[in-house]
């Protein structure tokens, strides 16, 4: 459907999280996701320049208590299976943004993630700051990862999360056009990569959550996985239900509408 461009407003770019890469960060595991928050959860992140619908999300708009737990940077050989056990015990489906190199190294864990009903997203091959890379490098980072995940699961993926949230608006458009991905940021960031301890991770997530939240965390950190049983139980006690990111976006009250004012 072709929409009138004049009816579409370019919305804020504030959600483009500023990348502040620690200077000597190893590729795997990366040292952390964020140093800057994405746009407020209520702000549409989109700049639809081709009459398309929204495709960049940091949360979903809804009144009902659904949230998406997301786990980045894995799979990890021991922590990810432990997390999968925790999720299975509670019948919770989450979303895993996998690093391609790790997916290639642990294909049986990738397969298990998919087999147990979780969603898998693309988190690049080497976890670089994409906003500093050429289009060719960005494409190969995503394509290699998509290929590794497809080799393990037989399925194509529909989501990507840029490491550190760092993707320029032009790159967002290119990635969406070339891969068809929704680009997923987050609305709750417990800064778990700084290893603040399980109870702090839990309290930050519980304090930040609201209906439609996309919760960022990392299943390559022991403290994060240690935090999950109590975190998930606390949210469930507040009547929150857990869905994958794509399920959450399907429920988004505004997802089917362009951002017109
Ligand atoms: Ni990451």
Image (cartoon, rainbow, N blue to C red):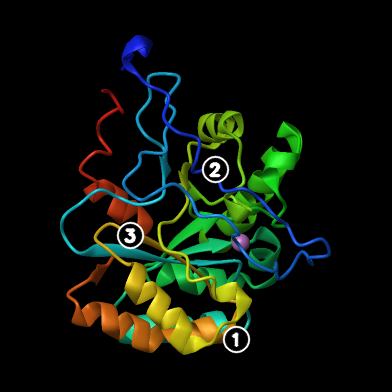
The tag on residue 16 is 2
Q: Residues within 10 Å of mark 3 (few under 14, many from 20)?
A: many
What residue is rendered at 44% in x and 46% in y? 39
Q: Is residue 64 placed above or below 132 in the rendered structure?
A: below
Which element carries disc 2, helix, strand or loop?
A: loop
Measure the C-alpha gap from mark 2 to mark 1: 32 Å
**Residue 89 picture quarter:** bottom left
Q: Quadrant of ligand 1?
A: bottom right
- For label 1, the residue is 78
What residue is rendered at 51% in x and 34% in y? 176
**Residue 2 picture quarter:** top left
What residue is rendered at 44% in x and 19% in y? 50
The C terminus lies in quadrant: top left
The tag on residue 258 is none
Measure the C-alpha gap from mark 2 to mark 3: 18 Å
**Residue 101 picture quarter:** bottom right
Residue 252: image location, x then y, percent: 24, 46
Q: Is residue 98 placed above or below 62 in the rendered structure?
A: below
Residue 133 seen in the figure: yes
Out of 151 and 130, give the one closest to the viewer: 130
Which element carries disc 3, helix, strand or loop?
A: loop
Q: How many marks?
A: 3
């Amino acid at each position: 459907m072709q929409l009138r461009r004049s009816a579409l407003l370019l919305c804020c770019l504030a959600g483009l999280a500023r990348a502040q890469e620690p200077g000597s960060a190893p590729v795997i595991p990366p040292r952390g996701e964020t140093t800057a928050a994405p746009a407020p959860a209520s702000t549409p992140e989109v700049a639809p320049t081709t009459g398309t619908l929204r495709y960049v999300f940091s949360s979903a708009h809804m009144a009902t208590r659904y949230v998406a737990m997301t786990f980045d940077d894995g799979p990890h050989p021991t922590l990810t299976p432990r997390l999968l056990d925790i999720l299975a015990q509670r019948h919770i489906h989450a979303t895993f943004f996998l690093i391609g190199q790790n997916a290639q190294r642990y294909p049986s864990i990738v397969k298990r993630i998919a087999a147990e009903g979780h969603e898998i997203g693309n988190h690049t091959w080497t976890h670089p700051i994409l906003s500093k890379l050429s289009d060719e490098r960005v494409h190969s980072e995503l394509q290699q990862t998509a290929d590794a995940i497809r080799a393990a699961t037989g399925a194509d993926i529909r989501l990507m999360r840029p490491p550190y949230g760092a993707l320029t608006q032009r790159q967002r458009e290119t990635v969406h056009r070339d891969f068809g991905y929704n680009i997923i940021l987050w609305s709750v960031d417990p800064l778990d990569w700084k290893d603040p301890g399980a109870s702090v991770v839990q309290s930050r997530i519980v304090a930040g959550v609201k209906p439609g939240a996309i919760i960022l965390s990392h299943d390559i950190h022991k403290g994060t996985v240690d935090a999950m049983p109590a975190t998930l139980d606390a949210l469930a006690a507040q009547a929150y239900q857990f869905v994958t990111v794509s399920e959450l976006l399907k429920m988004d009250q505004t997802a089917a509408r362009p951002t017109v004012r």
